[in-house]
Image: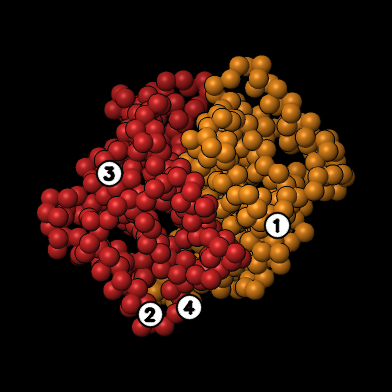
Chain colours: A orange, B red
Amino acid sequence: PPGRKVLIVYAHQEPKSLNGSLKRIAVEELSKQGCSVTVSDLYAMQFEPRATRNDIVGCLHNSEEFNYGAETREAYKRGCLSNDLIEEQKKVQEADLLIFQFPLYWFSMPAIMKGWMDRVLVQGFAHEFPNCYDSGLLKNKLALFSFTTGGSKEMYAKGGISGDIRYLLWPMQHGIMHFCGVKVLAPHICFAPEYVSEEKRKEMLIAWAQRLKTLWKEEPINCSPEWYFK
Amino acid sequence: PPGRKVLIVYAHQEPKSLNGSLKRIAVEELSKQGCSVTVSDLYAMQFEPRATRNDIVGCLHNSEEFNYGAETREAYKRGCLSNDLIEEQKKVQEADLLIFQFPLYWFSMPAIMKGWMDRVLVQGFAHEFPNCYDSGLLKNKLALFSFTTGGSKEMYAKGGISGDIRYLLWPMQHGIMHFCGVKVLAPHICFAPEYVSEEKRKEMLIAWAQRLKTLWKEEPINCSPEWYFK
């Protein structure tokens, strides 16, 4: 709906890839609805995935023994995080919906996107004990993981060699998003696009565009062990 | 036992941290046993986590549409991977045991270590369909995930707010190591070292040293959904 803000965090090296097309379709469809859409194109930004001392501008709270979590929490409070992190946090703060678009690498997101999670979702900004899970600091936001796989749907079935695809969603959806209070929409998964016909790939794009048309009417999943492991 | 080779992939910024001590103890204890121990100290190496075109030296197989998986597979065959990857692959190839030592970040490994997985475990080197899982190309090797957590043992219990700690081990142990044919030893977990006494932290170090003394007698876990989700 008009006025809603969406941040797409996108991690693919190639604009011509299916991930690139899925990202473009989301920008187009959501813009058409009147949403304001921002994209963090991580490879194009050469986004830094490493959590280091460089994330804190100026003096450390304790320079004797570097503790990344403690230092970034302090730096966030004092406004001393590095600029790239402040920029990303602004985008997150403004967004009603976060879409993560990526190819599945090793049952998870690519390192460049994991680095975005590690560095952007700082304590004090995204969570602050006891404000985690349902009372996480990013509550009232939605997230959606949209990704492509190498393995087929059969491999990722319950009883399949790679196990139910939901098993691998636990760390990303529950461990990260739910922990920060973000409600999670059902994932959008394109299985094995490299091994299907051009026509099938087109159908995948159409299905995503279709889903986006009614996305704002969707209810979040019940993000608890039952959803993942039954 | 004398002659066994161990690679420790280590991801912590601070040598004085508990992770730093756990790494040092592993080097000392395993060396004392006559093992030959190599450490990849990822932050000290400024290891690159991003999967990009720079990982291929010289021409691409298909420069029209960059496909990281396909390009690194080809580059591996032709010996055209970047030097940092060739170095890490040599260390993996020689190792009987891989130990991953890290602080848990967001229910997973830090991005710098995820980047090591994404970039080093190239198709053709670590797996090559149908040579995956029990017939993965790194079979006859062992792996052990040794990590510290922010959350307590109670939070990571079955029924706890963060769910059974085993849930989050699935992508790392099954999705990465088992996929490559590596057998997995039980994880070594130090819960919430930041919130316990100095004495408790010392006990954690002693427990790790003790475990290492009989490590080579351990049987791998049965890496199947039952172990993780019961």
Give the number of the disc on residue B141. 3
Left or right, A228 with reference to B20: right
C-alpha span from label 4 to label 3 = 35 Å
Marks 4 and 3 close (CB-CB < 8 Å): no
Q: Residue B146: which quarter of the image?
A: bottom left
Q: Which amino acid does label 4 sit on?
A: Tyr
Dot 2 or dot 4, earlier in sequence: 4
Dot 3 or dot 2, earlier in sequence: 3
Question: Which mark is in front, 1 or 3?
Answer: 3
x and y, in percent, of residue B7 in the image: 26, 51
Marks 2 and 4 close (CB-CB < 8 Å): no
Other-residue count near label 4 (Cα within 10 Å), few / some / many at <14 / 14–19 / ≥20: few
Tell which subunit mark 3 falls on: B
What residue sits 60% from the left and 49% below the top?
A229
Other-residue count near label 2 (Cα within 10 Å), few / some / many at <14 / 14–19 / ≥20: few
Q: Which amino acid does label 3 sit on?
A: Lys
C-alpha span from label 2 to label 4 = 10 Å
Q: What residue type is labelled 2?
A: Lys
Residue under label 1? A182
SS for dot 2? helix
Tell which subunit mark 4 falls on: B
Same-chain check, marks 1 and 4: no
